[in-house]
Image (spheres, rainbow, N blue to C red):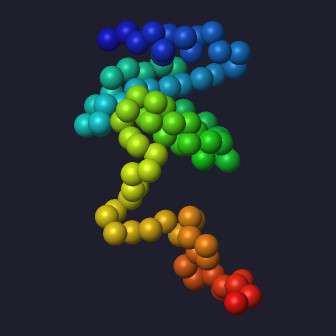
C-alpha cells in the first residue's frame, strides 16, 4: 500500500528521514526510509508525543479530559507535589 504522507518525506530538507504507520494491532501499514536506523531524538520525544495526542484528539480518537493510564491511578506529574518529593507547602 502506498501512503501519500510517507511519500511526502522525500521532500523534507533533511539528509535522512524515516517514518512508519502502525495499526492498533501492531501491524505495519507502511514505512519509508531506513526504518532499522536509530535516530538520536533526545528531548524532542515529549513534543512528538504531545503532537500525536493532539492529532488523536483532532481525529476524535481521544478526549482531552478523559483519564489516561491504568484505572484509579493519578499521574505524579500533574499532582501538586509528586510522590516521594518533600512538600514545599507553607501551611
Give the quadrant of the N terminus.
Answer: top left
Say whether residue 73 is left or right of residue 40.
left
Measured along the vertical axis of the image, is residue 72 above or below residue 17?
Answer: below
Residue depicted at x 59% and y 23%: 17
Q: Is residue 40 visible?
A: yes
**Residue 23 sits in which quadrant?**
top left
Measured along the vertical axis of the image, is residue 20 above or below residue 43?
Answer: above
Farthest residue to the bottom: give it.
91
Residue depicted at x 54% and y 33%: 37
Residue depicted at x 74% and y 88%: 90
Q: Judge by depth and name the residue closer to the eye, 65 or 62.
A: 65
**Residue 89 sits in which quadrant?**
bottom right
Farthest residue to the front: give it.
91
Q: Residue 79: where, in percent of width, then height?
A: 56, 70
Farthest residue to the left: give it.
25
Q: Is residue 38 visible?
A: no
Measured along the vertical axis of the image, is residue 2 above or below residue 41?
Answer: above
Q: Residue 34: where, in percent of width, then height?
A: 52, 24
Measured along the vertical axis of the image, is residue 12 above or below residue 48?
Answer: above
Residue depicted at x 34% and y 69%: 72
Amino acid at each position: 500500500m502506498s501512503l501519500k504522507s510517507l511519500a511526502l518525506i522525500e521532500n523534507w530538507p533533511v539528509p535522512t528521514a524515516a517514518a512508519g504507520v502502525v495499526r492498533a494491532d501492531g501491524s505495519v501499514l507502511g514505512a519509508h526510509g531506513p526504518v532499522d536506523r536509530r535516530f538520536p531524538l533526545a528531548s524532542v520525544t515529549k513534543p512528538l508525543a504531545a503532537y500525536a495526542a493532539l492529532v488523536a484528539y483532532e481525529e476524535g480518537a481521544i478526549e482531552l479530559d478523559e483519564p489516561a493510564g491504568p484505572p484509579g491511578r493519578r499521574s505524579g506529574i500533574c499532582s501538586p507535589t509528586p510522590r516521594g518529593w518533600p512538600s514545599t507547602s507553607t501551611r
